[in-house]
Image (cartoon, rainbow, N blue to C red):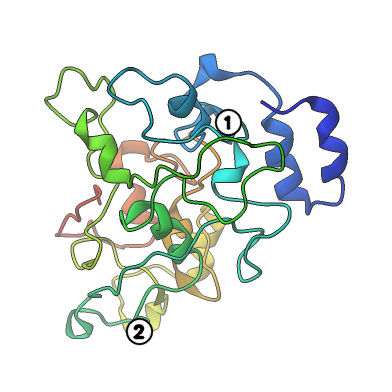
Amino acid sequence: MPDPGSLLKYIHFPSAAFFCCLLSVYPVKAQWPTGNTVDATFHNLTVPASNQSSDMRGLIRDYGEVCVYCHAPHGGRVDRPLWNRPNPRGSYRMFDPGELDMLADAQPTGNSVSCLSCHDGTVGLDEILNPPNGYTGEGPAANPIEACGLCHSGGNPRGGLDFEGVWFKPEDLRDQHPISILYAPGRDLGFNSAAEIQAAGLKLFDGKVQCMTCHEPHSQRFRPFLRIPNTGQNFCMVCHRNQPGEETAHGW
């Protein structure tokens, strides 16, 4: 964890990133991984990196900062907010246009690309563009998210936590919920209006459904990283007028 005094160099951050970095100075690991702030969620990779069993040792580098696995104050990418990860390396098979009434991008766009930089398994969990200034350790171990499944999978008694379903096939998104799709309920009467879903607490990005439409990556207040609670298993009904007849690989 950085020294609290080191926060002075971050005072020019945009407010969201500054808040994220503030969180990194408070030792709340006892709450991990189901807390309401990013440092107390699975997205705090300093916890598995620093508390590794013999099976995990070396799988993830401990950079000593919570936010740096995704964000960098300097030297990150300019096309996403202080983004500190390489783009995913996949060229994806997207959804069959004939099965969608709404218009989908040919490849993932927007914040979905950011999410896929971990969750499609083509980029190592600790592969970052700019390590912290005070880090003097080894370079990234570059193990993809699938490495978590070596132990953390259903039916494996060593795992304790089940990570199955949190990584996707690197080149095939057809069995996932559609992303990078223009939300246009006028093209499909089975969907509620954009105003209704946003009033319920979900978000559209440039009018599109992206990963972060449903997921808030900085809080486990509503698991699994949902923006709103899945009360009565009716989360899907925020957008869909009827329960979808097909489940996707990550639970919807």
Say the numbered circle drawn on residue 103.
2
Q: Residue at x 36, y 34 (%)?
A: 59
Evaluate whether residue 34 shows in this view: no
Location of residue 162 (image quadrant) = top left
Percent position (x, y) of residue 37? 59, 32
Residue most extreme to the left: 155
Say the numbered circle drawn on residue 150.
none
Crowding around mark 2 (Cα neighbors within 10 Å: few <14, some 14 to 19, many 20+) is: some
Foreground: disc 1 or disc 2: 1
Of 154 and 54, which appears nearest the observer? 54
Evaluate whether residue 169 shows in this view: yes
> Marks 1 and 2, Cα distance to the nearest angstrom?
36 Å
Q: Amino acid at mark 2?
A: Leu
For label 1, the residue is: 39
Left-right relation of 92 to 2: left
Choose the circle earlier in sequence order: 1 or 2.
Answer: 1
Residue most extreme to the top: 30
Q: Amino acid at mark 1?
A: Asp
Relative height, residue 170 to residue 69 (above, below): below
Left-right relation of 243 to 116: left
Relative height, residue 217 to residue 129 (above, below): above
Relative height, residue 87 to residue 4 (above, below): below
